[in-house]
Structure formats: C-alpha cells, structure tokens
Amino acid sequence: MTERDEAVPRGPVSEVIESEVTSLLRQHGSVVWYDAGGVFSPWVDALAQRGAGALPYAVVPFRGSFLEVLFALEAAESSRMAVLLHLPRHNSDSVRATPLLEYCKTAYVAPVTLDGLVTLAAAGRVAPPALREFLDRPGLSVSGADEWLKLQLSGERGDAAAFLDQAGPLWALDALVDGVNLEGRSTERGDPVLDERVVREFWHRQVGMDPEWVKAVTSDRGHTGLGHALASWILCVEYVSDLKRPPASEELLRLGSLPTPLIERCKQLCEHLRTRHPRRYISLADLVEADLPDEVSSIRPEDLGRIDTFRFEESRVLEAALQAARAAATEPSPDWSPVLHWARTREHSGSIWLSLDQTRRWAWQLLGDAARLGAALAAAPDPLSGAIDLDQATDAYCQHGAAVDEAHRLFEQRATALLEPRVQYFGQLRELRAELRRAYRGWADRLSERFSDLCRDQGFLPSERLRQRTLFDQVVTAALDARKDDIVAFVLVDALRYEMAVALARQLDVPGTQVDLRARLAELPTITAVGMNALAPLVTASGQLAVARSSDGEIEGFRAGEFAVKAPVDRARAIRNRVGQLVPKWRLSELMELDRPTFEMGRISSRLVLVTSEELDQAGESGLGLRAFDSLLGQLRAAVGHLQSLGVRQVILTADHGFLLQDETTRVVKYGKSTDPQRRHVVAADPRAESGMVAVSLTALGYDPGPGPGYLLFRQDTAVFATGGATASFVHGGNSPAERVIPVLTVTRDRPVGGSLAKYRTEVLPEADVLGLRRVRVRVLPDAGDLSALEFASESVVDVELVATGRPDVYVTLKDATGGGVVKGGRLAVRVGEGWTEVFFGLEGPREEMVALEVVGPGPVAPVAGFFSVSGRAPTSEARSVKSVSAKAVAGAAGEVSPHLWQSAIEDLFHRRVMLHLAEHGSITEVELNDFCASPRLVRQFALRLEDLIKVVPFRVRVEPGESGKRYVRERDERSEDERV
C-alpha cells in the first residue's frame, strides 16, 4: 500500500461514502457536492491525495481559490474524466454569486448528508436505538463515525450473531416462512446458539423491530411466534412509508421515523415475500390487516400510494373508482381523470391482489376501458362543430369523432369478453355499462343528426377527392402509374370502419414502412352491393354510376356498359377492362396459403392484384363481431405483411362501408309494412316527409337511376327500422359517419422484404378448463440454431394468435393471461425466451362442436394437442335474413356441412378456388374461369379433373353448354360425408 493510499480513510463509514460517490459519478459524470458544514473536507482532501491515475475520476476541492478550481475543471474536461466538485460552506443559493454558477447548473447535485451516510453504513449492523444515540451527539465527523462504527462492530456477538449476519435477512425470512424454528438451531460444532434473544436482536438490527412491537403482537393480540411479529412489522413499515398522510393508528406513527435504509430493507423483504411466497404473504397480510381496524375504517383512496400492501387498499380504490365512474357517466361535464389514473396505475402495478384474483383484474380492465370511453365522449361532445360542408365534416369526424367510436367498440369488446356474473362488482359494472351505452347513444344520435343536416343543406355528395367511386382512378391507377416496376395490391375489406383502420395503421407503422391513412365517404345506401361495386372503375364520363336493380327495386350493383357489376367476378372484369390486363383475385384466406412461386404463377405479369375479405361483415352479421373484430384486424395486419413478403411494394386497403353497433338503447321505428324498409334505409318512389328522416333522390347522389323507385329515405339518428326480425347488434345501410366514412389505407414498403433475421419456435400445452374457461400454456423461444434470435431474444416481444384450425367461423376470445404474456388487442404479446404464459379463452361459433386449435406466431404454426369445445350461438333471425355470402356458403352450398372440412382434400389451389366459388355462388362459366387464372391450360385441366373433385365436395356439379363455352352449375348433394371419397 502506498503512502497516498494510507492517507485515505478506510473506516466502514468512509467506505460507504466512497462507494456512494463513485456510484453517483458513474451515473452522472459531473457531480457537485455542497458541504454546508464542511464536515467532509478532511475526507475529500484525503481522497484527492491519491493523485492522477489512481482514481477513475477527478477530485476538485474548493479551498478558497475559484481560479484554481476553474483551471482544474478545465483540465478534467480536456481529459474527459468524470468530476467531483466539492464546495464546502456553500449551497445552491450562495454559489450564484461565484464564477462556478454556470458549471454547477449543468452538474448533478449530490444528495448526501453525513447523518444519511452513517445510517446507511450502520443499517443491519447496529440496533436503531444505538444509532439514534450516536447521531444525536454534537460534533459529528467522518473520522468519529468511522471509530464509533468500528467499535460497535468489534463487540463480542458470538457465533450465533455471526451466523445470522452471514446468512442474511432473506435467508432468515425464508426460514421463518418455511416453518423453520431458528431458535435452538446449532452451528456445525453442535452448540445450540440461535436462542430467541439472538434472533430478536438480529431483526432489531436488520429492520428495526423492537421488543415493544414483539410484545404487543405476541402477547397483547394473542399471536404466537416471532414470524408473525416480523411479518406484521415489515408490512406495516411498508404501508406507512407508502401512505400520503400520517397513519391513523397511534402505534404505526413511530414507524415513519425509521432510518431510510431500514425502511427500504422492510420493503425489500415484503417484495420478496410477495414474489417467493405469494400464498403465505396473502394469509399473513390478511391476519395483520385484522389488527388495523382504525386504518381500514379511515382510509381514503387519495391517501394511498402505489403499493397495495393490504387487501383493503386495493378494495377501497376499486370501490372509489366504481363510484367515480358511475358519477361521471351521468354528469353533463364529467371528470374521468381520477378513474383513468387509478385504472392505469392498477394495470401496471403488479399488485399481488390482482395477480392472484382473475375476476378483480377483469373488473379493473372493464373500468379502464369504461373510463377511456367516458373521457373520449367528454373530449368530443360535438365533433362536427364548425363544419359547413361534407368535406369539413369528414375531416372533423376523423380527427375527433372516430376516437369515440373506437373507444366504444373497445369497451363493448371488453364487456362481451369479461363482464360475467362472477366478476367483482358485476352488478355495478353492468349498470355502468348501461349508463355509458345511454351516453354513447345520445352522442351518436346527435352526431348522425348533425351530419344529416349538413347533407340535407349542402348535398349528400362530397367533393371528388372524397368520393368512393373515384377511388380506383385517383388512388389505384395513380399508384400503378407512379410505380412502374412495382406490384400493387388492392385489398377490399367488407365493413372495415374508419376507426378500425386507425388501429390497423398504428400496428403497421414500423421502420421501413410508410403508412398513409385518408378518408372517403361511401356511396349510399351503405350496403355491400353498393359500396363494393362502387370501388370498381365504373364512373361514366359524366361522373355518374348507372344503377343495376333487383326485381324488387333494390340496388344490387351498377352497370358497366353491357354488363352489370354485382359480384366479385364482375368487379374483376371491370378492373381488367380499365387496366388492360387480367387481374388475379384472391380471398384473404386463400392469400395466406400462397407461397412466392404460387403467387407469381397466379399473377402472371399483372402488376395489380386484388384481395377481398368478407370476414368482418360475416362476423358482424352472425352476431359474433365483438368477439372477432380484434382477431380479424390481426389477420388483416398479417395479410399486409404476407403481401409484402410475396414482393408487393404497395398495399391499398379500403372498405365498402362502416357499421353501427347496436344494443338495448337502440330505438326501433316502424315504417309501413315490415317488408318495406331495410334496417337503415328505405327505397321509395317518393321523397316522403317523415319525422326524424331525410330523403335524397338517386339523381342527387350522382346515379343514373334507370327504371324503378328514385328515392332513398334514411333515419337522421341511429335508430333502425322494424323489419320483422330480432334487432341485430351490427347494422349498416344508413347515413351516419360511422357507416359512411371509410378508410383508404396505403402501406408502402421502402424496400423489398427479406427473410426474418431471427427465427423462433412456439410451444403450447393444453390445460384443463377453469371455471368454464378454456386454458393453454404458451411460450415463444429463439431457435436454438439461430444466433441472431438468441442475441435479441431478451429484447423481443412478439404477438401470437390462437385460432381454430381451418375454421374461420369459430372465434377465439382471449379473456386473460398470467405469466409473461399480456392480452393486447385480441392477440397475446409475449417476450421471447421467458417462461410459460397461461392463457384463458372462450370459443364461440355457429354450433356446439369440438375443434382443433393452433397458435400462429413468428415461427412455424404450433398445433395444440386435443380438441376444444365450442359454445354454439345461433344467428339472430335478422342476421339469418340478410343476403350475405356467409349464409349461402354455410347453408345453401353445403347443407349442414362446413366447406372447411373438404377444402384441405383439394391440394391444387386453383381447383380449390373454383370449387369454393361454386359452393358459394352456384355457377361459373369458362370465361370466368379464365379470369380466375389467366391460363387456358389450367381451365382444361380443371375440366379433366372435375369428376375426381366432385368425389370430395358436398355437392354435385352439372355441366351445361353456353354461347361463350361451358357453364358449371352446382347441384345439391344428398350424400353423407362418409359416402364421399
């Protein structure tokens, strides 16, 4: 040891001081140390004597000359060393009159005092009374503190105390929790040394628990054993330290004056108990809580901090949040901030009372979404305020109104998934939902009426930039012209509401991708037959759309010259006529099965590909929308990523219309006979003046109406017409912003997508049902042979989805997750490489049955062993009456047999597409077959293989001659599945 090293104090307090100073310098680089009493000057001088090179930082003490200090600081800065500036007899006020002010403004101020450092050094080593007696002595110095602590530690404690000191408080706590009686334990020499006195003195030094507390707990309250006294002490210390006001109980008041290191030790032990012994912690905490009646009766939510030491804390906050939410839901100018604060705190608190009580977690999740809906309603009471035409109204809705519709959908999704009778405070939560539904209905009615007034006064058609009918030419054609060598995908999604596209855009906005979301107004009425067909390039030279009608006068599409555009094949033909080449078309489910070679074969040389998705509309019409929306949004996100992996550089995604969510607050109004109206509009021969309705002529909508009724009547609010069936929870066809504002989401990849840098594998294990919920365990691991995955695994969070294998009509509703995963937006977010996540979910579909499940994630699909039961749910009579593709696909084409049972038997993708088309549409011509594949050779192969294909499908096919070639017609098949090959 050198002379300089010998000059540095080596006492136990000095060692702690140096450790703290070094830690501060490592964190902050430049540290200024205001030493008002100058008590640290001898210690700092001794430290500075080590000289350059002996320390990893520069010590600059002020000893009367500011000039010397400035030179020393300049030298330290040039050498890029961390700097400790010691300023005795100064503070942050007095330094303002010195040349060191500018430097001190940028440096970190060391929050150290000699009392605090001595306390830190003595924590766990000296009993609190002895420490307090020493700190009360006058003339405290570093050298004196070193000598005092050395003397305290040099006393004879015996092997028992040494044994416990070496084992540490965590070991001793675990021993008590595990039922080990420390008293009477022997050392290796066999001497019984751990008597009660030794153990009590150990805990007195470690956490400050004194004999008075032990006596009060063990004698006065009738509890036995040192373990309960210790648990009571550390839990009460944590509780008092987290309170925002003094405790109500006299016996707890003194706990707030404990030295900070002992308080932190108590909190550390409490957290250790919660983490390592959660069940034992709960039983101990409940016993201690029973001894605190004054606290339980007097506590208020605003008194509590972020730690729920006792059960009554969490319960009181939940009760207060419910009361505040219900009050806010009925107030004209509500304040949702307290509820939002409490809900956000609990969502990220890691409270043991929530981690072990699933239904209480659900209550907080419901409260959080309820508060977000309430706050959204309060933030946008009149979203269209100031708008004077449809263009301004559309922009205002996108900026303000869409957020309310999103919050409402998310709340209803959460309530559908979690609001069950076994949830904590079910009755109050159900009443809160009813109150929020009434508030939202009033808001939506006012918004719709305001929008209808603008339409009536300014016209129902916006400017050309916002018209649905001009989208193809203004967006798709423009993209093809601007990106001469790139593939563009045009994705048509049935019933994708604007706010859902906002959520989708957030998910797609990743580095290397440009996301642009704009809005347009759907054509009227907002039904699939109008919106989907208007997305094809059908506008005449005068800007009109020529209406194609059904036999009862309803609009079922538009005309393009000599043919009517009513179906997907017709739209593909119209697009082909506009772009001058065949355009391949895939359904969303078909797209996800394509590999790169099959995709290239299907598109031939076309730079435009067409993708259609009906899943959102089908889920809504079947009554399962709220259970399926988030999952289906995830499928759309996956489809965009898959298109990019197939070489598509730009994806343009849009919708035919939006929708309204309905509930018991929806008004049902009569109009004529129940067969006269549709759910949200009426086709009429005259512009009838009805209360609460608005009329518009087809001509005013820019249509060439042709023969037939020439007017449309709409409700001004969100009410539905009585059509003779049950009220559906999902409707469209009207003129409200939620139905009419559609997204145009353009996703452009800056460069081609390559293979993933990291490879993962997903593991899943089935578990027994719990309280009616299905259950599996899931984890995602880096591929053992992939070094990049191993390197980034600890930082990677990936989304996985639980789906029914081959059954898009069966919906998985994720209820909850425990472990490392979090349920987020209908998907499960898990951290790669962590332990198992336990997932609780429900299954709902068209009927009760057993289905297989699989987990879809970043790696290969992981099938789940066994089968899971589905809760069957018959569609409403209203939904059954809707003329939708889903109804024909399931009922008309295949009887009671789902087409997904025979799809997998047809390996050839083209043949499978043709047979699915026959199943859903009933017929197909050779011209349409050519549109499907752009290859006469494949059409001939289909004709040759037809007999083999008929053997595995649940229908027969009749071949008829026609003017333009063969026509294949589906016939009902009475064969059972067993009779088919």
Image: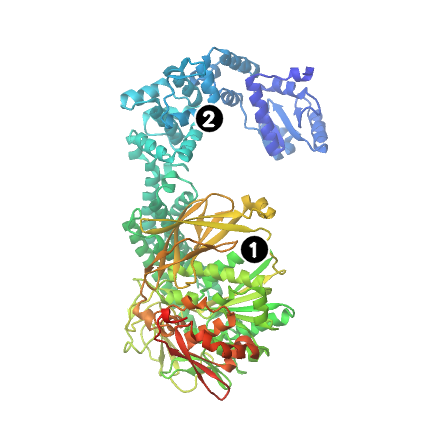
Towards the viewer: 58 or 931: 931
Towards the viewer: 689 or 683: 683
Mark 1 vs mark 2: in front: 1
The C terminus lies in quadrant: bottom left
Sort mark 2 into few (<14), some (14-19) or many (20+) by Cα contacts within 10 Å: some
Q: Residue at x 32, y 61 (%)?
A: 848
Sort mark 1 into few (<14), some (14-19) or many (20+) by Cα contacts within 10 Å: few
Q: Are marks 1 and 2 in contact (CB under 8 Å)?
A: no
Mark sitting earlier along the chain (1/2): 2
Towards the viewer: 918 or 757: 918
Q: Position of residue 498 (x, y in %)?
A: 46, 64
Q: Residue at x 42, y 65 (%)?
A: 616
Q: Position of residue 329 (x, y in %)?
A: 33, 53
Q: Which mark is residue 881?
A: none
Towards the viewer: 775 or 410: 775
Residue 659 can be seen in this image: no
The N terminus lies in quadrant: top right
- Of helix, strand and loop, which one carries label 2? helix
Q: How is the image coloured?
A: rainbow
Query: In the displayed image of the protein, which residue is found farthest to the bottom?
Result: 963
In the rendered image, the vertical position of residue 155 relative to residue 335, given as above or below: above
Q: Which residue is mark 2?
A: 260
* Quadrant in the picture for residue 70: top right
Q: Position of residue 468 (x, y in %)?
A: 49, 73
Query: In the displayed image of the protein, which residue is found farthest to the top?
Result: 156
- Estimate the spatial distance between the alpha carbons at disc 1 and disc 2, rounded to whole Å: 45 Å
In the rendered image, the vertical position of residue 209 relative to residue 839, given as above or below: above
The amino acid type, in three-letter code, at marker 2 is Thr
The amino acid type, in three-letter code, at marker 1 is Val
Q: Which mark is residue 510?
A: 1
